[in-house]
Amino acid sequence: MATGRKADTEDGNTAGGRTRWKVFALVLAAGFSGVAVMLTGLSKGAVAASFTVSGTSYKASADKLTGEGVVQFGSVDRSADEAHPVLVNGFQHAKLTNFCQSIHVTDLPGLGDATVRIKAADGMSADNLVLGIDQVDGDLTLNNVEIGRDASELSAGPDGAQGAPGGFGIQASGATIDDLRQQAWSTTASTLNLNDVNISVVPGDKPCF
């Protein structure tokens, strides 16, 4: 984590409005009120992505994510024949260093399984980034965090990044995640920049992590 940060207290809270956890997202939710509470929006029709997802999740990794204007709430991504419970992570602005994303494709004619890998050695940046995720791991620091806010009243993230009334929400002015490891169903952004990007297709299942 960043050097010069103030020492953590025994309950994990730090001085200066910061909160730190080792594992993000699903475990974060369970530590407070349970995953079921985070996902109360599922029964009320909240939808994460504004499109039907492919039914194939994908993985992404980065050495560090730095985000501004952060929200999180439970929702659902829908594919053609299935609903996928997700935690929506929204960022007004995000930067990721040493970014990698991988998609596993099965049963290609004449090839079998393959992996599409997208790498940005010089990093990725995005505005109004909204992710529908089912797991994220890493070292997390939240700044000026509010936990348990009504998901329909979240105001820190991108416009429209809100859940269903009565849903469990989290918001913060900023976030840092070191050693990011993420599995997601959907990504939307108003602007997405990949620096020094390389896109390749390799035989087999060879994910970013």
Image: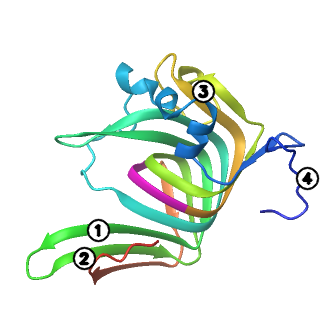
In front: mark 1 or mark 3? 1
On the image, numbered disc 1 is attached to which residue? 104
Magenta highlight range: 181-188
The numbered mark at residue 6 is: 4
Residue 89 in the figure: left or right of residue 206: right
Q: Earlier in the sequence, mark 1 or mark 4?
A: 4
Q: Position of residue 180 (x, y in %)?
A: 58, 62
Secondary structure under tag 2 reads strand
Q: What amino acid is labelled 3 in the image?
A: Leu
Q: Earlier in the sequence, mark 2 or mark 3?
A: 2
Quarter occupied by the N terminus = bottom right
Q: Earlier in the sequence, mark 1 or mark 3?
A: 1
CA separation, marks 2 and 1? Answer: 6 Å
Secondary structure under tag 3 reads loop
Q: What amino acid is labelled 1 in the image?
A: His
Give the class, few, some or many, for how many residues have Cα within 10 Å of label 3's Cα (few <14, many ≥20).
many
The numbered mark at residue 114 is: 2
Q: What amino acid is labelled 2 in the image?
A: Ala
